Amino acid sequence: MLKSIAATAAGLAVLLIAPPMAPDLAAQAGQAGAQQQAGAQTQQQGQSTPQQPVFRTEIERVRVDVQVVNSAKGDPVIGLGLDDFEVWLDGRPRRVTSAELVTFEHDPLPSDVGATTVRTPGRVPEDARVFVVAIDQLGLPVAAITPMKETVRRFLLQLRPQDMVALYEFPYRTPKLDISHDHTLVARALDRVLGMRTSQPGSYNLSASEIVDIAANDSDTLNAVLARECGDLTVDIGCVENVRAEARGLAAYLEVESSQRLNELVKLSQTLAFIPGRKTIVLMSGGLITSSKAGGRPDIRSMLSAVGDDIANAQANLYVIHLDSSMTEAYGAATRGTRISNTGLTSRAVDRFQTLTQDRSTMITGLEILAGRAGGAMFSVDAGTPASIFDRVLLETKAYYVLGVEPTDEDRDGKSHYIRVETTAKHAAVRSRVQVFIPQKK
């Protein structure tokens, strides 16, 4: 049963706009109980007894939602107490003052609510998990869409009637997020999802890793590409600059495209911040290309970190599913052949399998940064469907802990602080945010 999530939202069809910043500090749990008890005593005393003054004390604490799951199987680790958690703010240990377990059981609906009754609109009930299936259309090729849709529909059938779900396909979508108990609405909405990722434009068969390396002035990669694409450089001396210019142009193009996709995730996280309580985002993408080299492009690392922070601050748990199509794309490039620039030579096959490992790493790096910054998890699927990952998501989200962490006066500075949570439980993985905002002390 759910212990601590209850919320209201305007029909739960929320426009994608930025919310005001809200503090992360919550009052000590005993305060609410004391207020309720004092109110009840006042009613019992009636008008005949003068109301006595009530003195209350308040200890502010940082709320941190934490998932603790078996690292191998994914089932939640339950039964943990205060002594089983350790928390650090900016590398300094802080005291955990409370640890509350929130569970979602497969309880039947109340007798007056039918199993197929749609309880939306209006609010998020206490017994509901909230899921958002986010589909990165620009990051997925057409071939990946049909099996992905089948997997999502299977996931929808496994949800409890109490659970709420929304589809968020981006970019190029209506700026509204419909979160509903009616899971069939989401199943039908999947029909409009498209795969928009295509092969890179240009005259040369440059892979993702080659674009990043050449844009960062990697001479070894440039020479390997020149040998493959240009043939005899004494015949076509302009090929060197043409390859270099194309790589730099594609890097700039990919940077703009990735920024556009991340902006859509910013809108999503800002919208979810309006809905109190914990939410779960399942993001499916074919990759986000970013350079890991100083001065390299595309460089979206700072934006990835900012988006990850936004997701964490919205109390959203992020699961990233990487649908790896690098093998298929390498095979397509190898059989497609290439034009040998201005030499009059006939097309020949290009062996892209040599860069397969580097390409996969380049495509997955951005997703890893995003998931890590949000305190989430990333899974890669290189064959078959992501059905097993969705099964794990359902299993892991059955329970989580709400920790109360006591900050010091030094921490109450109106700034964000790095936070790290660990558990003494064996063979356990901890999923939690990596930054927290602490308001100034009043």
Image (tube, helix red, strand yellow):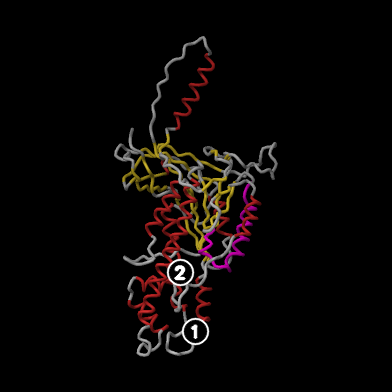
Disc number for residue 349: 1
Which residue is nearer to you in this view: 399 or 318? 318
Give the residues in magenta. 135-160
Q: Which residue is at the far left?
A: 410
Q: Amino acid at mark 1?
A: Ala
Task: From the top left corner, tell me how far across and down residue 63 is, in percent.
Answer: 43, 40
Q: Quadrant of the C terminus?
A: top left
Label 1 or label 2, whichever comes before in sequence order: 1
Tell me if residue 378 is in the magenta stretch.
no
**Place of residue 21 in the rendered image (x, y in percent of width and height, measured from the top left):** 41, 42
Nearer to us in this view, 149 or 240: 240
Residue 125, x across and y down, in percent = 58, 39
Q: Residues within 10 Å of mark 2 (few under 14, many from 20)?
A: some
Residue 412 lies, with reference to residue 430, above or below; the image says above
Q: Secondary structure at mark 1?
A: loop
Tell me which residue sits at (52%, 11%) in the image. Answer: 47
Question: Could you tell me how far apart the alpha carbons at marks 1 and 2 are, in whole angstroms?
Answer: 21 Å
In the rendered image, residue 124, in percent from the top left (x then y), is placed at 57, 41
Mark 2, residue position = 360
- For marks 1 and 2, give the one nearer the viewer: 1
Taking 312 as reference, is 161 left or right? right
Position of 173 with respect to 412 (left or right) is right
